[in-house]
Image (spheres, grey):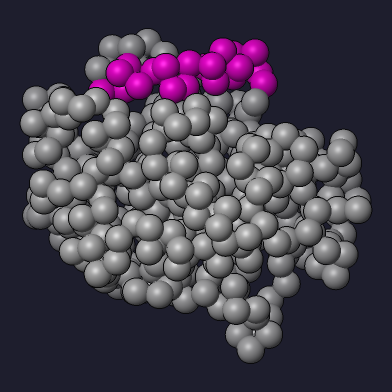
């Protein structure tokens, strides 16, 4: 389940800093001016609007070329034919903002063109779009009520007409919890928000939650058996950086309408994890050894209670590298092999011929390059 909250954002070099003159209202606010997408970054109480200009491939850095390779690999999964396996069932509140309803239905339909390949015929996916005004419906719908603690604080904020820029995961599973073996996905937003208000990060939440249904489809039988070892056993099989991080990788590539916006998204995502207020291990990401040790630290959430959001950041970068290096077909095998009774390390060896430690070592330089982006002076 993804909750998109931003804490601190840094700035970008002046060579690509851009022009809107207004002071932004909150971190990751977006604005389109003269057809160019901007995002606002905060640092030391000051705001800066930045964008990523369109450049030829030859002018991209090696880091950016890796990102382009992953972006293209994922975008190639969008089929030109209508889904033949997925059957969508939309449950949309009348309180849901109409502009976001249209946008998110389009995002679900686009993601279905990529995700359909993972499912057997006649697989129902229930899609829920709800707001704080629909709390009674949520409470009366067990598949939604079971996750209410994940968005309870946002319900309070939205009732006070605050935090309207956030989009929060509402459902993300494949199970028979309702008596039928079906997928459940969706988001919850403020009834008073709009497309112009939500953050750039929020744009991938719909596809992100939906991708968890793909992941769960292949681990359903194991879920039925249960995890006697509790959270540690679960995370040994489905590493947080795999479940959340790679869902971010896939969803972001599908949700950003251009490679420039994709780059903009990651520059903002990484910038917020640098400087004041950043998670302490992120301050050490200045050499390969520290990147590897941080990835190792993030294998189990009990190692550090603060890693919940950070798994999205490093995980998405690590699996971006993996998809660029090995191709999306290899990544798909990691998803398929969740149906086997093996842990994540064994899955890596079976699928790619490398173990987790080798993966961390190989992906470390890509993560290092992401975190080299300078803070403002």
The stretch of residues the image draws in magenta is 143-162
The image position of residue 297, as x and y in percent, is: 46, 42
The residue drawn where x is 26% and y is 53% is 345
Q: Is residue 140 above or below residue 177?
A: above
Furthest residue toward front: 289
Q: Is residue 323 above or below residue 31?
A: below
Q: How many marks?
A: 0
Closer-to-camera residue (129/373): 373
The residue drawn where x is 73% and y is 61% is 373
Furthest residue toward bottom: 58
Find residue 369 and report its image quarter. Answer: bottom right
Q: Is residue 2 above or below residue 22?
A: above
Closer-to-camera residue (340/269): 340
The image position of residue 252, as x and y in percent, is: 48, 56
The image position of residue 7, as x and y in percent, is: 68, 34
129 is within the stretch colored magenta: no
Could you tell me if residue 334 is visible in this image? no
145 is within the stretch colored magenta: yes
Closer-to-camera residue (368/268): 368
The image position of residue 366, as x and y in percent, is: 55, 66
Magenta region, main secondary structure: helix
The residue drawn where x is 30% and y is 72% is 80
293 lies left or right of 57: left
Could you tell me if residue 377 is visible in this image? yes
In which quadrant of the rendered image does the N terminus lie?
A: top left
166 lies left or right of 323: right
The residue drawn where x is 55% and y is 25% is 191
């Amino acid at each position: 389940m993804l909750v998109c909250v931003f804490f601190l954002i840094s700035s970008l070099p002046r060579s690509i800093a851009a022009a809107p003159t207004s002071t932004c209202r909150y971190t990751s606010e977006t604005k389109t001016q003269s057809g160019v997408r901007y995002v606002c970054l905060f640092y030391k109480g000051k705001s800066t609007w930045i964008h990523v200009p369109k450049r030829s491939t030859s002018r991209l850095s090696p880091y950016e070329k890796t990102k382009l390779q992953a972006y293209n690999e994922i975008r190639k999964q969008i089929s030109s034919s209508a889904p033949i396996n997925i059957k969508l069932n939309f449950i949309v509140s009348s309180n849901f903002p109409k502009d976001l309803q249209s946008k998110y239905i389009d995002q679900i339909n686009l993601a279905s063109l990529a995700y359909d390949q993972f499912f057997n015929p006649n697989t129902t996916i229930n899609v829920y779009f709800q707001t704080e005004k629909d709390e009674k419906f949520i409470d009366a719908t067990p598949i939604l009520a079971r996750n209410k603690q994940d968005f309870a604080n946002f319900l309070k904020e939205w009732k006070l007409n605050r935090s309207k820029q956030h989009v929060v995961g509402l459902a993300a599973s494949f199970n028979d919890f309702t008596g039928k073996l079906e997928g459940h996905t969706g988001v919850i937003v403020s009834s008073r928000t709009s497309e112009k208000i939500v953050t750039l990060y929020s744009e991938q939440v719909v596809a992100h939650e939906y991708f968890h249904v793909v992941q769960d489809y292949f681990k359903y039988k194991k879920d039925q058996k249960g995890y006697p070892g509790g959270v540690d056993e679960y995370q040994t099989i489905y590493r947080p950086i795999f479940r959340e991080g790679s869902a971010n990788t896939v969803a972001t590539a599908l949700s950003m309408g251009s490679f420039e916006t994709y780059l903009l998204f990651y520059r903002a995502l990484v910038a917020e994890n640098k400087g004041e207020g950043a998670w302490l291990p992120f301050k050490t990401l200045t050499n390969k050894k520290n990147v590897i040790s941080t990835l190792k630290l993030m294998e189990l959430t009990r190692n550090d209670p603060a890693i919940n959001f950070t798994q999205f950041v490093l995980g998405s970068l690590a699996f971006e590298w993996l998809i660029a290096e090995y191709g999306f077909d290899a990544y798909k095998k990691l998803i398929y092999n969740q149906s086997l009774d093996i842990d994540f390390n064994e899955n890596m060896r079976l699928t790619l011929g490398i173990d987790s430690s080798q993966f961390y070592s190989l992906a470390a330089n890509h993560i290092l390059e992401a975190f080299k982006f300078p803070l403002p002076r």
